[in-house]
């Protein structure tokens, strides 16, 4: 492989990674807790975008339960986003990772 081919591969990889980053920003992932009483929505990067709480779970005498449900829903949504991110990265990288373990850290991801 000559230097020109290596540079082309690098440019292709950079373009694919930019596409993946944009895709992850548009992606919406959600998870629920408490049988659907709390729903957390995150983007493909795991950034929290919204929380929905069923009014039946709002009990001033038991705030701790609500806090636990919110934490569980957010944690699960973020885990789903990490899994989706890893899948997208592997797909974009194809065979170009050169044996690097995924997910490897790239700037902006």
Image: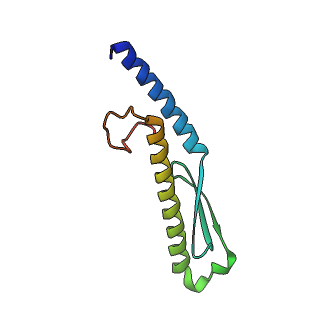
Image position, residue 41 (x, y; %): 60, 58
The relative height of residue 27 versus residue 36 in the rendered view (above or below) is above
Q: Nearer the viewer, residue 97 or 14?
A: 97
Q: How many marks?
A: 0
User: Can you tell which quarter of the image residue 5 is in?
Assistant: top left
Q: How is the image coloured?
A: rainbow
Name of the residue lying farthest toward the bottom:
61
Name of the residue lying farthest toward the left:
99
The relative height of residue 54 versus residue 87 in the rendered view (above or below) is below
Q: Residue at x 61, y 70 (%)?
A: 38
Image position, residue 108 (x, y; %): 45, 38
Q: Quadrant of the C terminus?
A: top left
Image position, residue 107 (x, y; %): 41, 36
Name of the residue lying farthest toward the right:
55
The relative height of residue 3 versus residue 58 in the rendered view (above or below) is above
Q: Residue at x 47, y 40 (%)?
A: 91
Q: Residue at x 50, y 69 (%)?
A: 72
Q: Residue at x 44, y 41 (%)?
A: 90
The relative height of residue 4 versus residue 68 in the rendered view (above or below) is above
Q: Nearer the viewer, residue 92 or 15?
A: 92
User: Can you tell which quarter of the image residue 2 is in?
Assistant: top left
Q: Quadrant of the N terminus?
A: top left
Image position, residue 54 (x, y; %): 67, 74
Q: Nearer the viewer, residue 2 or 54?
A: 2
> Going by the image, does 96 lie left or right of 79?
left
């Amino acid at each position: 492989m000559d230097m020109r081919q290596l540079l082309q591969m690098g440019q292709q990889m950079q373009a694919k990674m930019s596409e993946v980053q944009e895709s992850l920003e548009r992606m919406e992932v959600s998870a629920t807790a408490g049988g659907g009483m709390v729903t957390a929505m995150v983007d493909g990067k795991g950034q929290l975008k919204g929380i929905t709480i069923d009014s039946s779970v709002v009990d001033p005498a038991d705030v701790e339960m609500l806090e636990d449900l919110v934490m569980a829903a957010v944690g699960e949504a973020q885990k789903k986003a990490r899994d989706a991110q890893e899948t997208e990265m592997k797909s974009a990288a194809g065979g170009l990772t050169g044996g690097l373990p995924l997910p490897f850290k790239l700037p902006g991801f």
